[in-house]
Image (spheres, helix red, strand yellow):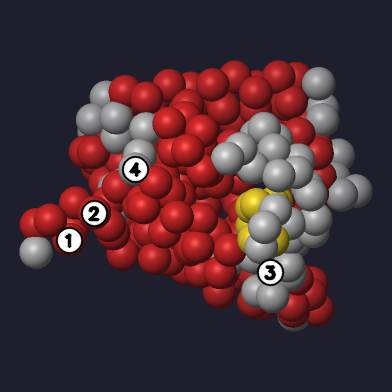
Amino acid sequence: MGVHSLSCSVVDKAVRQIEEELREGKWQASTRLPAERVLADMLGVSRSTLREAIQRLVSRGMLETKPGSGVYVVHKQPARLSAPWLQLVAENPPLRADMLEFRLVFECAAARFAAQRSTAEELGKLQAILLKMRNAVEAHDVDAEATVDGEFHTVLTAASHNRMFDQLYATVIRTLREHIAANTFDATLNNTNAVRQSAMRLDQHESIFYAVRDRDADAAQNAMFAHIAFVGKQFEPGFAQ
């Protein structure tokens, strides 16, 4: 049992490492990944672990294998979950509240566990993302803010080191990331308070990070709750901050 758990943990970590490289653009669409031996050395895993990690990413539609050629980044990410859901949210505003309620349960718990279990490396990644977020907010770059907002929540979820969250990550994280981005865009549309609200969202993310860094699980959970509640309030009639 212990050996199996360790094996799964190593594969999960390899999956997250490859996903992070893809998100950061190390390998562009249609690019062939390095040879198996080279990539295994880069990730510090065995070739059997790497094969399982790649197979998981193939099943998620992020990578594809070409017999006799290698493993490639898919040209376009499939929209199996995210696009239909986001269209429903756009057409049925109450569904936004349903997603926010799900995020309250999922991400508040993730923040709590991240405060207890995050590594120094993960804290460094969160801090680097916050720097990018601050630069985006100061430059009024909504595209960049939306992107790094999603990155923050993704890294935080991984930092919870919860196996069930890993499973949820595999099935719904793309939906969550696009929901976060959509909220960022929608909150700035025809909004005279958009600049102020962007700054407030940055402050909220920093509060989450500080609580996680300080190993204060209650504060991390509460900071995430306050952030998601604020996101929801942005869409209430007459809301202004």
82 horizontally vs 189: left or right: left
What amino acid type is highlighted by mark number 2? Ser
- Residue that carries the numbered disc 2 in the rendered image: 7
The residue lying toward the viewer, choosing from 222 and 50, is 50
Q: CA distance from mark 3 to mark 2?
A: 30 Å
- Residue that carries the numbered disc 1 in the rendered image: 4
**Screen quadrant of the N terminus:** bottom left
Q: Residue most toward the right? A: 190
Mark 3 and mark 2 residues within 8 Å of each other at the beta carbon: no
Tell me the SS state at disc 2: helix
Question: Of tags 3 and 2, which is closer to the observer?
Answer: 2
Residue 46's disc is: 4
Mark 4 and mark 1 residues within 8 Å of each other at the beta carbon: no
Q: CA distance from mark 3 to mark 4?
A: 33 Å
89 horizontally vs 38: left or right: right
Residue 197's disc is: none
Whether residue 231 is visible, yes or no, is yes
Mark closest to the chain's N terminus, 4 or 1: 1
Question: Of tags 4 and 1, which is closer to the observer?
Answer: 4
- Residue that carries the numbered disc 3 in the rendered image: 82
Q: Is residue 120 above or below residue 22?
A: above
Q: CA distance from mark 2 to mark 4?
A: 11 Å
**Image quadrant assignment for residue 75:** bottom right
The residue lying toward the viewer, choosing from 15 and 185, is 15
Q: Residues within 10 Å of mark 2 (few under 14, many from 20)?
A: few
Tell me the SS state at disc 4: loop
Tell me the SS state at disc 1: helix
**Screen quadrant of the C terminus:** top right
**Residue at point 19%, 51% (across, down):** 6
What amino acid type is highlighted by mark number 3? Ser
Q: Residues within 10 Å of mark 3 (few under 14, many from 20)?
A: some
The residue lying toward the viewer, choosing from 10 and 229, is 10
